[in-house]
Image (cartoon, grey):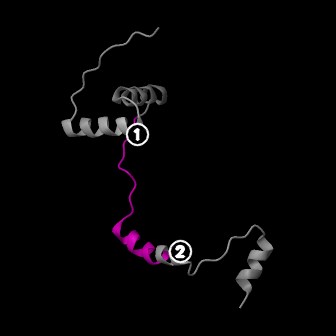
Amino acid sequence: MQTKTVLNVKVDKTLKTRARHLAQDLGVPLSIIVNAQLKQFVREKRLTLGEPLTMSAELERALGPIDRDIKKGRNVSKGFTDVKKMIEYLEED
């Protein structure tokens, strides 16, 4: 049986509350999340930090018309499983 210990870490109160609620939403105690991160840190011997990936406003503006076309079924070709049929479709007038 593994011996357990207590780890006291100063954490921003709001961050702790948000993390605890998210862990509850996932159905696990916050200690499971913390332990999983510590195990990954020890196993991989590296720390990965980063912001969530988000699109820039410029990219969102550029993709907006494409998204609207897809939702309306405009400017979208059918799917193909045969390359020859795809080329024939693309070469049609």
The image shows residue 25, relative to residue 35, as above or below, that is below
Quarter holding the C terminus is: bottom right
Residue that badge 1 annotates = 48
Mark seen at residue 59: none
Find residue 35 and report its horizontal and vertical position in percent: 39, 25
The crowd level at tag 1 (other Cα within 10 Å; few <14, some 14-19, many 20+) is: few
Q: Which stretch is magenta?
A: 47-66
Find residue 2 and report its horizontal and vertical position in percent: 44, 10
What residue is shown at x 36% (from left), y 28% (from top)? 29
- Total marks shown come to 2
What residue is shown at x 72% (from left), y 70% (from top)? 80
Image quadrant in which you'd find residue 25:
top left
- Give amino acid for label 1: Thr
Find residue 66 and report its horizontal and vertical position in percent: 49, 76
Q: CA distance from mark 2 to mark 1?
A: 35 Å
Q: Which circle, 2 or 1, is nearer the viewer? A: 2
- Give amino acid for label 2: Ile
Name the side, left or right, on which 69 lies relative to 6: right
The image shows residue 34, relative to residue 59, as above or below, that is above
The image shows residue 48, relative to residue 93, as above or below, that is above
The image shows residue 85, relative to residue 9, as above or below, that is below
The crowd level at tag 2 (other Cα within 10 Å; few <14, some 14-19, many 20+) is: few
Mark seen at residue 70: 2
Label 1 secondary element: loop
Q: Earlier in the sequence, mark 2 or mark 1?
A: 1
